[in-house]
Amino acid sequence: MRLIKFLTIFLLFLCFVPDRVRAEEVLTWEDCINEAKKNHPDLVSSEAKINQAKANKTIISSNLLPQISSDMSVRTSKTANRDRTDTYSYGITGKQLLFDGFKTFYNRRAASENIKSAQYYYEVISTDVRLRLRTAFVELLKTQELLNITEVIARRRKQNVELVGLRYEAGREHKGSQLTAQANLAQAEFEVVQARRNIDLSQRRLTKELGRKNLTPIRVRGDFEIKYSNRERPDFESLAGSNPFLQGLIAQREAARLGLKSARLDFIPQVYADANIGRTGSEWPPDEDEWSVGVSLSFPLFEGGRRIAEVSRNKALFSQLQADEQSGGDRVILNLEDTWTKLQDAIDKVEVQQKFLAAAEVRAKIAEAQYSTGLISFDNWTIIEDDLVRAKKSFLDAQANALIAEANWIQAKGGNIEE
């Protein structure tokens, strides 16, 4: 009978537990990384750009290979003094580029640089995705912990209301103190509800960065430990040299330089060898063999200044990317030093806030005992209680901010989603 009662109560409990709670998924940071690598649309998009750049190089390289085509035709002709005649023909034509002033050679090298640029762009996107994913992960971790803190504060505020109520009924406290304690409780209960709503928002943000299409209940498991322990000032110029954003700018500049050389070679004649073999005749299938071989030279005489304009455009693009590279390098170095400095400040602030919290906990414990025995007034006690609440929240904020600062530092160094 006891077993039956237990199973009945258990089943009723399951019926009243919301589906969201039962289906809540717990993810670690490694789980989030592995899922985002596969599903994040920004990574899929940037990977497709790499494939586009590789295909473009294959298209350019195909100009160096023989171009072979087949043709078949049927023609009917008639003149005023002759009967109608039919002509049938088919054949194979081949064409091979012999010389174009190395234009295709430079185009292939430029295409290779564009592939590098696309790969570095993928790395940049990967660093951005990692930063956003880490930020969303830390935010959900923080809101989960904040909910726990606010629930503890609410319980403490409720005990305070009961303590003040007893003293008020005994005539040792005035009405204002009781109303203040009740207001503090109402504020604490509001913050619990607010924290729960913030969890919903944080879950949606993390779901987006995971690359999921639909919102699902998620919890994250982790800690607030800073993994970056080196406090020595790094060589920012050296770190900037390996930054994928700067490397991408260098690849773009090199591609523009090669593109400028290619544009200048448009003024060089192009030489082709061509050959044709096939059959022709007045009946199908044609039975008369024909073939031809030759060399052709192509050079446009007038195109309205198009080639001159293309050279000017490529020269301007090269100058632009040179300036972008210099500006980008300066920004990368500045961002490295800025994020490193903020990380050091955030780590130090965690230590300071931890000491404030330890002091506030001790003061609150002593003040509660003093107030219950009438050694301090309500006004002094509530100030100490408020300090404890602020210290708990400030310590949590400091821990979360330190993790975000660490993520920004990793992103500034070029750390991608694999890191």
Image: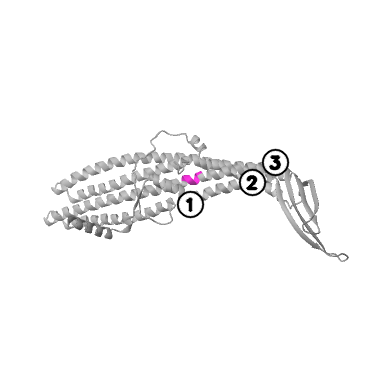
* Picture quadrant of residue 186: bottom left
Which of label 2 and label 1 is nearer to you?
1
Crowd tier of the residue under label 1, counting other residues whose Cα lies within 10 Å: few below 14, some 14–19, many 20 or above = some
Q: Which residues are magenta?
A: 123-127
Q: Callout 2, which amino acid? A: Ala
Q: Quadrant of the C terminus?
A: top left
Q: CA distance from mark 2 to mark 3?
A: 22 Å
- On the rendered structure, is 322 left or right of 368? right
Residue of label 2: 316
Q: Is residue 257 magenta?
A: no
Above/below status of 410 relative to 187 = above
Question: Which amino acid lies under the numbered mark 1 shown in the image of this protein?
Answer: Pro
Most foreground residue, 267 or 322: 267
Q: Earlier in the sequence, mark 2 or mark 1?
A: 1
Quickly name the residue at label 1. 41
Instruction: Report the amino acid beneath label 3.
Output: Phe
Residue furthest to the right in view is 81
Q: Earlier in the sequence, mark 2 or mark 3?
A: 3
**Mark 3, residue position:** 102
* Comparing labels 2 and 3, the label whose residue is closer to the camera: 3
Q: Regarding mark 2 in the picture, which secondary structure is present there?
A: helix
Mark 2 residue crowding within 10 angstroms, few (<14) / some (14–19) / many (20+): some
Q: Residues within 10 Å of mark 3 (few under 14, many from 20)?
A: some
Instruction: Kindly report the distance in space between the C-alpha atoms of the residues bearing marks 1 and 3.
Output: 39 Å
- In front: 39, or 174? 39
Please state the horizontal and vertical placement of residue 284, each as a whole percent of the image.
Answer: 77, 58
Q: Quadrant of the N terminus?
A: bottom left
Spatial CA span between label 2 and label 1: 34 Å
